[in-house]
Image (cartoon, rainbow, N blue to C red):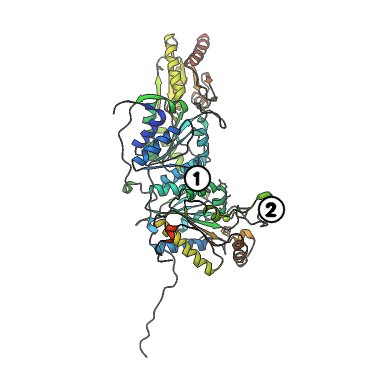
Amino acid sequence: MTDKKMVETLIYTKSESLTELGTHYCPGCTHGISHRLIAEVIDEMGVREDTIGIAPVGCAVFAYDYFNMDFAEAAHGRAPAMATGLKRVNPDKIVFTYQGDGDLASIGAAEIMHTAGRGENITVIFINNAIYGMTGGQMAPTTLPGQKTTSTPLGRDIEMHGFPMRMCEILSQLDGASYVVRRSLHNVANIRKAKKAIRQAFEVQRQGLGFSMVELLSSCPTNWGMTADEALKWVGESMVEAYPLGDYKVSPEIKGMKKGGGG
Amino acid sequence: MAKELLKGNHAFAEAAIRAGCEAYFGYPITPQTEALEHMSKRMPELGRVFLQAESEVAAINMVYGAACAGVRVMSSSSSPGVSLMMEGLSYIAGSELPVVLVDIMRGGPGLGNIAPSQGDYNQIVKGGGHGDYRPIVLAPASVQEFIDLTVEAFDLAEKYRCIVIILADGSLGQMMEPAELPEMREVRRFEERPPWSLSGAKGRTPNVISSFYLDPLNEEEVNRRLMAKQAEIEANEIRFRELMLDDAEIAVVAFGTSGRIAQSAIKNAREEGIRVGLLRPISLYPFPYERIRQLGDNVKEILVVEMNSGQMLGDVRIGIEGRIPISFYGRQGGVVPMPDEVLEEIQKVNSRSSAS
Ligand SMILES: Cc1ncc(C[n+]2csc(CCOP(=O)(O)OP(=O)(O)O)c2C)c(N)n1
Ligand code: SF4
Ligand SMILES: [Mg+2]
């Protein structure tokens, strides 16, 4: 027999764009998956040292401790305005915000709308978990009709609270928005698609093509009162039904863009 | 540079540009809008950043973002707009970022009107936003002083990494006076941005700018640092002007436009033989308590004149510590007092204090 060489193939490692710190997210929460996907994309693009992130007020408030790059902490909902200020004086840097649904679709509705409308060359990662996670599970503008939360104990009554807001659909109507897509994190196949979309969004920014946003349907098992598995199932069924996945806006310039390495 | 006829709003905007302001974010509101309009033309001409935000909430958060990058950045607004900025200002204070803001006060509360007022003294001088912080607050009384203080504001903001607010009123924004602008200063080069700024963590550990400290002991540490900075500011940055106080029996204390009006009244009173002088605080924070305290030893009575219902009055009372009488004359809601009205008040105080 010939000599057998031991060959080690590295199939998984910590992203350089993440710090060593363990996150505080609940078991089964998909915030961690989103972080990982963003970090992998930034690693693969080789832009960690040129990227500045903006953390929201929400469960991801500590994102600046988990991402290994320059970071700022915004006021609740104001990350897109802050990103605008930062990007305008740092046009060569990659600037992204990471925002929850309360942050982006409720208190920060004006800021996201106008940032998209201006075609601000930034990237927004929008975590839609149909609830206010950080404050203990109150209704979000994205909460589904009938969904029980601590502030809709009998379920969201559309007569009283109106209807969920579909931000991709709304923002895609703005001429300034270049890339607006919705993905889901409820299983591996969808997670891979989500990563491709995040890569595309950052590429759009790198090439100066304007406003990009990836909405990620996410889980909050803690405040939904579900196990991790039940929560993912609920994302895959109820949330995907209410928030159809897809590309809501892909500007012609992006369609003509050369495919980046990560797709 | 030669003197030219300048409108207050144009003058401070141009002064900011010449002080090396690299980015301006704002939202139109009378009586401040000429500054925004001036910026909209001049900043792009110079390759700098101008952006009309969707609201003052957004404007101050754009300022917050640009300040994180370590550039000279400012906004300007008027009372209702500044109210909307309070959240952002608190975050900026908590993050210890250098920011300059100009507030051209107008009549209030509510929508009020667009006439000159000093009704926001308490809001601005005592902090304004939530939490334990104080911005440096400077009050000009002429277009020239407005220019000079604007330039100084950028230096002070960077020296202490704090907010500096120039508190003026609609008449200062709108009036035209001969004044001299400073030399043009280039904006800071990228390599010259401060080491704490967010510029991409190239070959260094990441910088984080945040005002979030879950552990109260850590937050207390930040608060203590802010307090120590305030002590330094209080020791070094008190500014005021005085006029004819040497032999005065009555001291008028008034800031900004009220101070200017009081000055005319005092000159007339002097002609009548009334021994009256003026103390015009320029730094409202830090407030010249010590000088006020000395006045309590030297004069018989104080007259405070303001375009509000008596807001700085509280600070004068602190300085006087109840030792001598203090009277107050104010006009509100956008009404500017006439020198004659102030003269009449001085006469009243004079007859009372000479009778006693
Ligand atoms: C001005 C202001 N209002 C309210 C809050 C309280 N608050 C903190 S996080 C949050 C909601 C967060 O929900 P979301 O943005 O959906 O993020 P999640 O925690 O679900 O990821 C609220 C209301 C605050 N911090 N600031
Ligand atoms: S509360 Fe919900 S969103 Fe927040 S960390 Fe826990 S599971 Fe995630
Ligand atoms: Mg949420």
Q: Amino acid at mark 2?
A: Asp
Query: Extreme right residue here?
Result: A154
Q: Which residue is mark 2?
A: A157
- Please, is residue B348 above or below residue A237 in the view? above
Q: Quadrant of the N terminus of chain A?
A: bottom left
- Residue B288, labelled with which disc? none
- Please, is residue A102 above or below residue B188 in the view? below
Q: Which secondary structure, mark 1?
A: helix
Q: Which residue is mark 1?
A: B220
- The residues bearing labels 1 and 2 have C-alpha atoms spaced at a distance of 43 Å
Q: Quadrant of residue B263?
A: top left
Q: How many other residues sit within 10 Å of disc 2, few (<14), some (14-19) or many (≥20)? A: some
Q: Quadrant of the C terminus of chain A?
A: bottom left
Q: Chain of mark 1?
A: B
Q: How many other residues sit within 10 Å of disc 1, few (<14), some (14-19) or many (≥20)? A: few
Q: Which secondary structure, mark 2?
A: loop
Q: Position of residue B64 (x, y in %)?
A: 45, 44
| Picture residue at 40% right of the left edge, 66% below the top | A261
- Please, is residue B109 above or below residue B338 in the view? below
Q: Amino acid at mark 1?
A: Glu
**Left or right: residue A151 compared with residue A66:** right
| Picture residue at 53% right of the left edge, 67% below the top | A190
Q: Quadrant of residue A236?
A: bottom right
Q: Chain of mark 2?
A: A
Q: Pick whichever, A110 or B315, lies toward us.
A: A110
Q: Pick whichever, B172 or B167, lies toward us.
A: B172
**Left or right: residue B137 compared with residue A130:** left
